[in-house]
Image: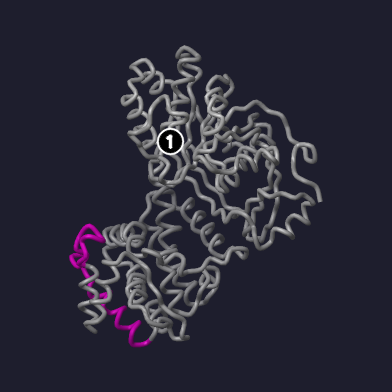
Amino acid sequence: MLELNSKTAVKTERPERIIQFGEGNFLRAFADWIISNMNEQGAFNGNVVVVQPIEKGMTDLLNKQDGLYHVNLQGIENGKVTNSCRLIDVISRALNPYSHFEDYMQLAEQPEIRFVISNTTEAGITFDPTCRLDDRPASSYPGKLTQLLYHRFRHFHGQADKGLIIFPCELIFQNGHHLKRIIHQYIDLWNLGQDFKDWFENSCGVYATLVDRIVPGFPHKTIHAIKEKLQYDDNLIVQGEVFHLWVIEAPQSVALEFPASECGLNVLFVNDEEPYHKRKVTLLNGPHTLLSPVSYLSGINIVRDACQDPDVGRYIRQVMFDELIRTIDLPEEELQEFARNVMDRFTNPFVDHQVTSIMLNAFSKFATRDLPGLKEYLQRENRLPKGIVFGLAALITYYKGGHREDGAPVTPADDVTVMEHLTSLWQTGDKHAVATGVLAQTDWWGEDLNLLPGLTALLETYLSDIEKNGMRTALKNMLNQ
């Protein structure tokens, strides 16, 4: 078995055109995989310089392998099971700005650099007022980026064609808007001047993006078999699902410079990211939240098994295709295709996704993922979505705790105040009190949901049926209504 580096594997030399803040699993299995595909198809000719956003990271390991690693994609594609490995050769080098600050700043002087991509976690796009321009480097990611942009502005004397295109991939709605606002805060804090502010505003673009690919990461369970198959000692293999989606809120001029959509990749350049954000939250995260308590209390532990169960699978499809999908303003064919892809992802034979892992803080998840769909459906259809309401009843029952029918423990986890409130409601033994007490929590929902026509009565009905007949029978009763 060979060590993996540029001496044992082919690595193509290309100009460094992209700075990537973040060396973790997601960007390597997502953005770098996309760039690799563009390079291979001749639509793009560029490599990536990885910048480690925090003091400790993986730059040494990346450089040891000369930036080479494999992406192992697993899942269902076009109805068929796939399990592929691809060598990624787009990372030219990795820099730690905490130990090589001058090398980091010199990136700003490279004329070919055009793009910045980042994934510094949700906590990464924050404003730290203690950051200073002469820090080596600034502690926050926006601070580091502002340092780099200002150095580039000065080095190239404010040339308009030396601006950068910036794609943040952090899981924050309107991430680009947040990042741009924080950069302006640093420009003001550091008194960098109106000329630089104008250059940043007019010559650079910070664009909101939505990213979607499940990336479990390093394949600990199967690593020896994968290495044996590849015949490389690759210690940076990253595993991900086949599905990928990158929505970028940017003009077509940017799409021409980053032509991923021309390469058969699921990369969309759109005027407004919000409908796609809503689609993902509603049709991926929404069903996840609802299926979890229904599945677990039906004796099912894995998301894939829930989708393949006759009753629970029918329930999931009802919620997704008959209820939630009707609340989104995008073309019907596009929504149907996305929903089918979600079902393929839920049934991925390579991922054992525990339904209990989705249950953490489930009430706050329901509030953001499912409640908007419930209200929108009621408004559009003039009736309640039974599947969503039943899911809420299952969720409330899950928070009762205890044991399910086969003896497995039911152990909800949430904020202490949420747990205490649910416990006190269930201790009344009154389903009406439980229903009204949950729906009245304006701190959770932002309003008193008892005011929604018919919701209190329907929720109470489902709570009573679940307690009297068990989850399986209650589910069948709801489905057959």
Q: Main secondary structure of the magenta part?
A: helix
**Residue 301, image x, y percentages:** 51, 74
Amino acid type of the residue tagged 1 in the rendering:
Ser
**Residue 394, image x, y percentages:** 36, 74
Q: Residues within 10 Å of mark 1 (few under 14, many from 20)?
A: some
Tell me where the magenta segment starts and ends, as one range. Answer: 440-469
Q: Tell me, yes or no, whether the highlighted magenta stretch contains residue 441.
A: yes
Q: Which of the 4 image quarters holds residue 51? A: top right
Question: Could you say which is closer to the camera, residue 34 or residue 455?
Answer: 34
Question: Where the C terminus falls, by quadrant?
Answer: bottom left
Residue at the image position 55 percent from the left and 60 percent from the top: 345
In the picture of the structure, the residue carrying the numbered disc 1 is: 139
The residue tagged with tag 1: helix, strand or loop?
loop
Q: Which of the 4 image quarters holds residue 27? A: top right
Q: Tell me, yes or no, whether the highlighted magenta stretch contains residue 19.
A: no
In this picture, residue 209 sits left or right of residue 31 = left
**Residue 190, image x, y percentages:** 34, 24
